Image (cartoon, rainbow, N blue to C red):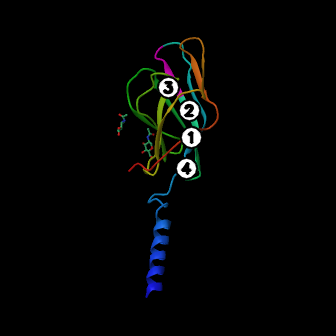
Amino acid sequence: MKTMSISALVLATATSILAAPSPVVPALEPLQLTNLNAAIYSTSPPTTCLLSFALKDPNTNTDTKCSAYWSIGMPGNKTYNCSDKAYQLHLPNGIYDIENIDLGVSRADGTESGRSVVSGDLWKCEKQEYPKAQCKWDGIFSLDVAPST
Ligand SMILES: *[C@@H]1O[C@H](CO)[C@@H](O)[C@H](O)[C@H]1NC(C)=O
Ligand SMILES: *[C@@H]1O[C@H](CO)[C@@H](O)[C@H](O)[C@H]1NC(C)=O
């Protein structure tokens, strides 16, 4: 009797140790954005910014491309389809400053969604003749994603 209750206890403990670290939803790998680039080409208003990148999703093994045009300084919140329409690029707050871009990427089926501000030392910006400018991300931009409820 004593032996049985100890092994039952050991079993219960082992089960809870196994259960604890496995979350309900499997962890998602971050999306990998390469050739992340924003540019203002025109010298006459409206000052239009073209944002583009190649997207690799290690979770679904998908590669696609995403891009967006935005008039600098215009308020707004817009969603763009990527080449693979399962993925969307979001500009939740428009673009005010090419050196500081708030962007999001999500999957249409709600399984992945992430948002981040692109800025800092790895966001290499080159001012040209005003208002021309170009910024490129040095390396791979990692975007953490989670299921959108
Ligand atoms: C984006 O893709 C969806 C399909 O996933 C389609 O219904 C929608 O019309 C597309 N929007 C644009 C602007 O192409
Ligand atoms: C952008 O619009 C969508 C719906 O169109 C909304 O769900 C989202 O919260 C908005 N984002 C911001 C930053 O306002």
Answer whether labels 4 and 1 touch (C-beta < 8 Å): no
Callouts 3 and 1 close, C-beta under 8 Å: no
Residue that carries the numbered disc 2 in the rendered image:
52
**Chain part drawn in magenta:** 45-50
Query: Where residue 87 appears, x then y in whole percent?
Result: 49, 44
Q: Residues within 10 Å of mark 2 (few under 14, many from 20)?
A: many
Residue placed under numbered mark 3 in the picture: 100
Which amino acid lies under the numbered mark 2 shown in the image of this protein?
A: Ser
Q: Is residue 111 left or right of residue 55?
A: left
Look at the numbered disc 4 and say if its residue's Cβ is closer than 8 Å to ligand 1.
no
Measuring 60% from the left and 14% from the top, which residue is drawn there? 128
Q: Which residue is mark 1?
A: 142
Tell me the mark number nearer the camera, choosing from 2 and 1. 1
Identify the secondary structure beneath mark 3. loop
Q: Residue at x 51, y 54 (%)?
A: 27
Identity of the residue furthest to the right in this view? 139
Q: Residue tagged by mark 4?
A: 29
